[in-house]
Amino acid sequence: MRFVASTLIVAFSVVSTIASPALNIAPRYSNGTAVVKPKVFLIDMVSLAIKLNQYPSPVKFYLKFPPEGNVWYGIPEFNLLERNITVPGFSPLFPDAHCTANGDVCQLVTGESEINAATSITALIFSPLFDLTKTYFMVAGIAGVSPKVATLGSVTFARFAVQVALQYEFDAREIPANFTTGYVPLGAFSPTEYPASIYGTEVFELNRPLQALAVSLAKTATLNDSSAAMAYRANYASISSYLPGSQSPSVVACDVATSDVYFSGTLLSEAFENTTKLFTNGGGTYCTTAQEDNATLEALLRGAIYNLTDFSRVIVMRTASDFDRPYANEPATVNLLYANQGGFEPAVRNIYLAGVKVVQGILGQWEATFKQGVKPDNYIGDIFGSLGGKPDFGPGSMFNDNPVTPSGMRRRMRMRRGVGGGGL
């Protein structure tokens, strides 16, 4: 998740329209309840916490962070607070999954950053409280955005997620004259070489037909905007390549960059734009910037190896809260730290406005379209080819285009230990 520092002030005004301490939250459930089989699971990164107990100061509530997760509470379409299920391994700040009474729609809040996302999603997947084999997962959070592709308030759906900061890094003041950036792919000798050392989480590719369906459903929404965002984005019209950034919010199919480091500025954004193209063999379009998505996808993929999740049922939706770089002659620090970009409030609101159309589409067309799954017409999975098939990026499958299976993993472990492979 990304947000501009100055927008934290705005969050207090958003709270009153999105969440209320008067919401009727049902009791928590733990072990002993029936297994929940969600059709849709919303994945948010942050949520609002309200404390009404006594404090030394007059302040009667505090903000954990601006409320991505809270836009789903108190809405007319469904009530996520009817069932609240404590899941071991979730963040201590967000210990519960929230579900409708019938369990068709659920939500969790992972906490920000890659480690929190991977840990919470892994805890969910391996929890006996849920059957996720037919579940559609939708990441629903805010992000930074490139003015070359979209603008403040826009809603984006990714096919590729790229872990752009998984590289060597040199201070830019110490790089050779022929380097365009201090980031060099692992095992490579220049920023333009493909990484020679592959970790497996560099790139994920999602189901393209499902992405297209999500885009078409989201386009039926009327998106929110703000006068401050309108005024700020107009500054980007002076550079022709930034014209998309000067337009009104829209729904866009483009890709997400993952980095725990909250980077900002023209040079770093252009560097990671190049990384996205490089890592996806030219197939990806750098668009939004976030902190969790590759971690979330790795956990979901590992669940798919054990037939606990279906990786073809994953959607990544990010709404644009701030530009990843300044407009012409604006200092990068002003863009990130001080400017009132005006994008946070509409971005948060558009998570719900666009996202609920996707949820309703899945539920409404469950029998006709979604129950049996949306068949991908492209490769889906990681850079290793763990789910089978040949990746259209990277060096090719590590497993001869065959899927990894639990029995195959156990066999490889025995061989490494010298058991069943001729050793002791």
Image (cartoon, rainbow, N blue to C red):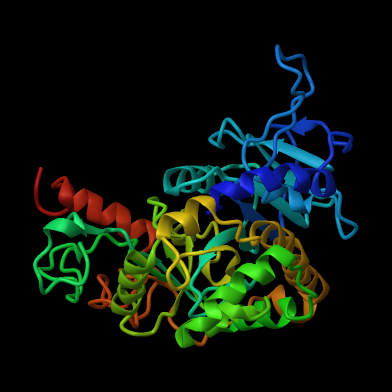
Residue located 89% across and 35% down the image: 22
From the viewer's perspective, is 360 left or right of 67? right
Q: Residue furthest top?
A: 56
Residue located 17% across and 53% down the image: 415
Residue located 9% across and 48% down the image: 423
Give x and y (percent) for residue 70: 74, 47
Give x and y (percent) for residue 99: 76, 48
Q: Residue furthest front?
A: 329
Q: Quadrant of residue 403?
A: bottom left
From the viewer's perspective, is 372 left or right of 329? right
Q: Quadrant of residue 370?
A: bottom right
Give x and y (percent) for residue 314: 57, 67
9 or 87, nearer to the observer:
9
Residue located 86% across and 49% down the image: 74
- How many marks on residues? 0
Q: Is residue 151 visible to the viewer in this orientation of the structure?
A: no
Give x and y (percent) for residue 383: 32, 70
Q: Quadrant of the C terminus?
A: top left
234 or 401, nearer to the observer:
234
Q: Is residue 116 visible to the viewer in this orientation of the structure?
A: yes
Measured along the vertical axis of the image, is residue 44 above or below residue 23?
A: below
